Image (tube, rainbow, N blue to C red):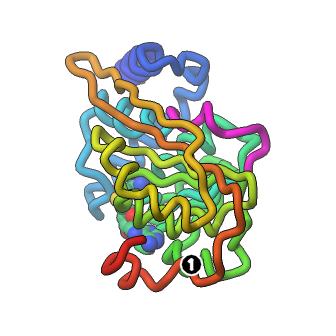
Amino acid sequence: MTDFYNILSKTFKNNGLAEYIDKADIFFKLYNSLIDTNKLYNLTAVTDVEKVCALHFADSLSALKYIEKNADLLDIGCGAGFPSLPIAIARPDVRVTAVDSTAKKIDFVSSFSKENALANITAITGRAEELARSEMRHGFSIVTARAVARLNVLCEIAVPLLKLGGHFIAMKGSAGKEELREAENAIKALGGSVTDFSEWELVLSCETQKRTIILIEKTAVTPDIYPRAYSKILKKPL
Ligand code: SAH
């Protein structure tokens, strides 16, 4: 625990997240659950303590500054719970719905949340584009997605899930600018507008990594025809 605490503290401080160090106990539990479950089922390729603290925990928390108080948030393609689990841990005021099409990943998020009394997160197995055609359409003030698909594809799934005035936080690597250019048409067609574009550096002890956050506000109602079936979205992105 001491080693973990030191590494987490340093990583959070170096990334402007010092105020969340008081959640170290639960991040330690999340680290251990991730490593233990990873032996049975592949959840993540990242297992080194410092890398998990930076690439999973700190990177996930970089979305926090865009999330208003008491937000209703949906995380598309959460995998082992990123960014949804760190957000739910750091912000008990935010109601988090974590969605993934792989049941085993959702089982992990769900069991961890129950075992650690995280009452503000619900994990659902399903395809996000199908949820966007259910009563969940227009249901969220924030939608997040990290490492799921290219931005033009993601926008067709994310924007319909937003309430008017809500925001899609797209968490991207170094190719954010190029993806944004490619998605301009999709964003417009879906009723979105880009309200922030931020390129920043995730700090590890021996390197920094480029990250991009693109913030898209839903400023008009999305036409009913979207989202199309996933195969169509992929074959002919907007
Ligand atoms: N967001 C996590 C996981 C990224 S891997 C992280 O950053 O670590 C991408 C995940 O998205 C996979 O677990 C995959 O099952 C899921 N996924 C891809 N397309 C999806 C869709 N349309 N609906 C729900 N989940 C999806």
What is the quadrant of the C terminus in the image?
bottom left
Q: Residue 155, percent across and down?
A: 49, 62
Q: Residue 9's image quarter?
A: top left
What is the quadrant of the N terminus in the image?
top left
Q: Residue 131's image quarter?
A: bottom right
On the rendering, which quadrant does ligand 1 occupy?
bottom left
Q: Is residue 39 above or below residue 194?
A: below
Q: Give the range drawn in magenta.
A: 61-71
- Does residue 104 show up? no
Q: Residue 4, percent across and down?
A: 38, 24
Q: Is residue 182 left or right of residue 17?
A: left
| Residue at image point 30% right, 27% down | 50
Q: Does the magenta stretch include residue 85?
A: no
Q: Circle 1 sits on which residue?
A: 226
Q: Residue 183, percent across and down?
A: 41, 58
Q: In this view, does 2 lie above or below 129?
A: above
